[in-house]
Amino acid sequence: MNTALTPEQIQFYHELKRDPLRFEQYRCGDARPAFHADSSFIKLLAGGNQSGKSHSGACETAWIMTGDHPWRKVKKPPVTGRVVTYSIKQSLTVQKRLQAVIPKFMIDGYDFNDRRGFVNQRIKLTNGSLIEVVTASQDTLAHASATLDFIWIDEPPPEELYSELLARLMVKYEPGVTGMYLTLTPINRPVEWLLNEVNRGKISYHRFDLTPANCPHLSAEQIALMADSYLPHERAQRLHGHWHGETRSRYFDAYDERCITDVRPTGEVDIGLGIDHGEKIGSQVAVLVAHVEGRVWILDEYRNESRTDPEDDAAGILEMLDRNHIKPHEVTVAVGDINSMGKGYPAMKISDAITAAITKKLRLQRPPFHITSAMKSAGSVSWGERILNYGFKRGDITIHPHCEYLTKAFSHYTGKNTDDLKHGIDATRYIIQRLLGYDQAYHRLRFL
């Protein structure tokens, strides 16, 4: 089979590399042209994660800056604009999108790298158009310091910032050619006020589903894989850009009877403990797991049946290890909540107190294992819960049938913090997130 490129194909790829913006209108799928053609003063494009909505925003920005828009009239350059993102990390992502579509020969003094973006987060074209990329967390005075022709907001902004940014557009306002556009997935940030603006007719609203026709960069298989990785209540928003998630009776819909087995791993394994602390009866939970090459077996559970102290919990954990024929020093990794002992011992964590009690009971000079702190960074809870659900879906996580509390927890947990089943979910999440979180299949589930 001859796979050599024809001269015409070679010429096309050279042109595509030199001037990608010329071809973007032919690669944007079925749904996005309506958004680009919309000349409303304020317009919004809602879509799922990885749907290409930020790429759409970058294309819209590039067309406005160059003054050559394939679908509508825009202001003659030079124009001045601003991109507003919710974080420094997202700012870098947006700058990567912009440098991918704006031809390098059009950028005055092109200087970009993947680690810091453009110099001073500003892009100036040879035609005089200028754009700066800022974050929503910057002081409002910074947002109030310019008069602008256009503003792109990537992801939902705070309401007060939105109002301030609108004021920056009024001096140069020209109907149909200047304005604001938003690209977003409406999740993890307050959006009710934004929905109210849409319902009042103040914002022209566009939304598209995550399908191969709308997102040519994704195959049906990739979209199905993404759907499997989201939690049930997230799918309406993360796949389709809806304002609200669906109400589901089961939080972990991938968990069923197939996840329950009395099969235990053989040979060399890593032994892990996940521990959640709570003040109420039944809220101190420890989970014992075995881990081998991307698979986790939940072997046993300890749950206090009365109000306990660190000595009682240490005894319960040691008893759980003993009935599974595991010596304390064989525990490879232990992860616990970050709670402190309270007013009497403000500098001591409960995990440290349990570790000290275990060491004392074993009459050792050094602890057989240390309990490290669970991940508490932004988005870590949702990430850990996605890991659990996806692990059940893939068959990478199983639970022994004698773990009665955990089997009930995963069957009936509703996602509410007040739910007594949450402590078992959290203890399991702490340890499995540590064990599986950086495997390739699970690390990609980490997003805000």
Image (spheres, rainbow, N blue to C red):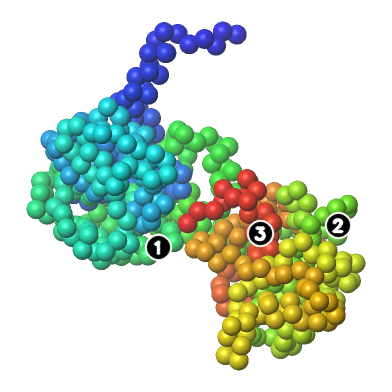
Do residues under tags 2 and 3 come within 8 Å of each other at their CB atoms? no
* Distance from the alpha carbon under mark 2 to that under mark 3: 20 Å
Residue 141: percent from left, percent from top: 21, 63
The disc at residue 434 is: 3
Residue 81: percent from left, percent from top: 21, 46
Q: Is residue 302 above or below residue 308?
A: above
Q: Is residue 108 above or below residue 307?
A: above
Secondary structure at badge 3 equals: helix
Q: Which residue is mark 2?
A: 264
Q: Is residue 225 above or below residue 367?
A: above
Q: Badge 2, how many Cα within 10 Å: few under 14, some, many 20+?
A: few
Residue mark closest to the camera, 2 vs 3: 3
Is 217 left or right of 363, judged from the image as shown? left
Mark yes or no: residue 383 visible.
yes
Q: Quadrant of residue 259?
A: bottom right
The disc at residue 98 is: none
Q: What amino acid is labelled 2 in the image? A: Arg
Residue 425: percent from left, percent from top: 66, 68
Q: Is residue 123 above or below residue 2?
A: below
Name the residue at 34% across, 27% down. 20
Mark before the other along the chain sequence, 2 or 1? 1
Mark yes or no: residue 299 visible.
no
Q: Which residue is mark 1?
A: 189
Q: Badge 3, how many Cα within 10 Å: few under 14, some, many 20+?
A: some
Residue mark closest to the camera, 1 vs 3: 3
